[in-house]
Image (cartoon, rainbow, N blue to C red):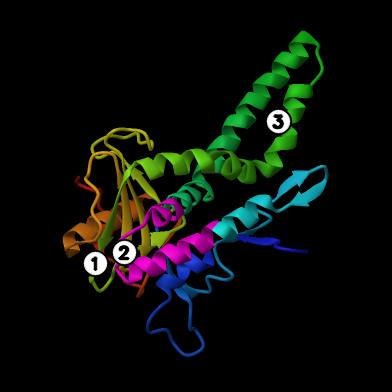
Amino acid sequence: MDKEQQHVIPRGYLKSWACPNSPAGKNGMIWVVRKDNPEKRALKSPKRYFRELDRYTLNTGGARNLAVENTLSTIETWFAQALGNIAERKPLTGHDRVKLAFFASAMVLRTRRIPTAVEHMLQTIQTQARKQERKANIDHSFSDGINELLPSIVGKTVADGLPEMAFVLFRMNLSLLLTDDDAGFVTGDEPCSVIVPGAWNAYPTHPDVEIILPLSPQCAALYSWKIPRTSYATLDRKTVDRLNSRTVGQCTHEFVSWKGTVRPEWFLPDAA
């Protein structure tokens, strides 16, 4: 069946983290590290890892609707184009910023955290609705409608949230952070860290929010309302380790390290 296996984390994105000194027969594989057991790490194929069956497929009249999966594929192509310009250290154009905004938005919405939260919220609403429907002796059309929506909740979350999230990110200041650190930036099963320094809650429109998305082991994007836009800024190891601690902290189960490196600093709370 067409496009059954759909990636939670795009393999084109993960390609930048391919192990540079992989053993024979392991070319193109990435080091995946267990967050709760950093000693447990393994080389995985980005083609076959971080994927699920029909994750974004919508059910429209009983038919498989691949509109969201196809849109994500287009956005991944845009990202590759923008990353090519970044690799050459070209000034970002307006088109590049739009492409990165849509890609970063997709990376926030397509992973497990937000769709799972939306699913749990709808399930709670559905439970309450069924109680009220039974109590009032009315039809179950509202709770049944939620039940029909739930199988496509990931695709619907991405489809409905993508334009709004991209609009927010495009308005924010975008900085590109560089490193020549040997370990580089890490990524993982929740690549985008959304942090308000010193606060427990964070959301994109918070005035102090900092959204960081690693673009490759050598470059990360920083979105902020307050930090002035910087085209290319090189960071020292201490700052890279701090940002990696944010990424690792946001990941649910696993993170990806370019060379399989794991540093204790990545498991410390960010002091910012």
In the rendered structure, which disc, 1 or 2, sits on the residue that comes first in sequence?
1
The one nearer the camera, 217 or 258, is 217
**Tag 1 secondary structure:** loop
Residue 114: % across, % down: 51, 41
> Disc 1, disc 2: CB below 8 Å?
yes
Question: Which residue is rendered at x = 69% and y = 20% of the image?
Answer: 129
Residue 23 sits in which quadrant?
bottom left
Is any atom of residue 16 visible in this view? yes
Residue 240: % across, % down: 23, 60
Q: Classify residue 232 as left or right of residue 38.
A: left
> Disc 3, disc 1: CB below 8 Å?
no
Q: Tag 2: residue type?
A: Cys
Q: CA distance from mark 3 to mark 1?
A: 46 Å
Write down the residue under mark 2.
219
In the rendered structure, which disc, 3 or 1, sits on the residue that comes first in sequence?
3
Write down the residue under mark 3.
146
Span of residues in magenta: 75-99
The one nearer the camera, 4 or 41, is 4
Camera-side mark, 3 or 1: 1
Write down the residue under mark 1.
179
Q: Residues within 10 Å of mark 1 (few under 14, many from 20)?
A: some
Q: Identify whether 251 is placed above or below 209.
A: below
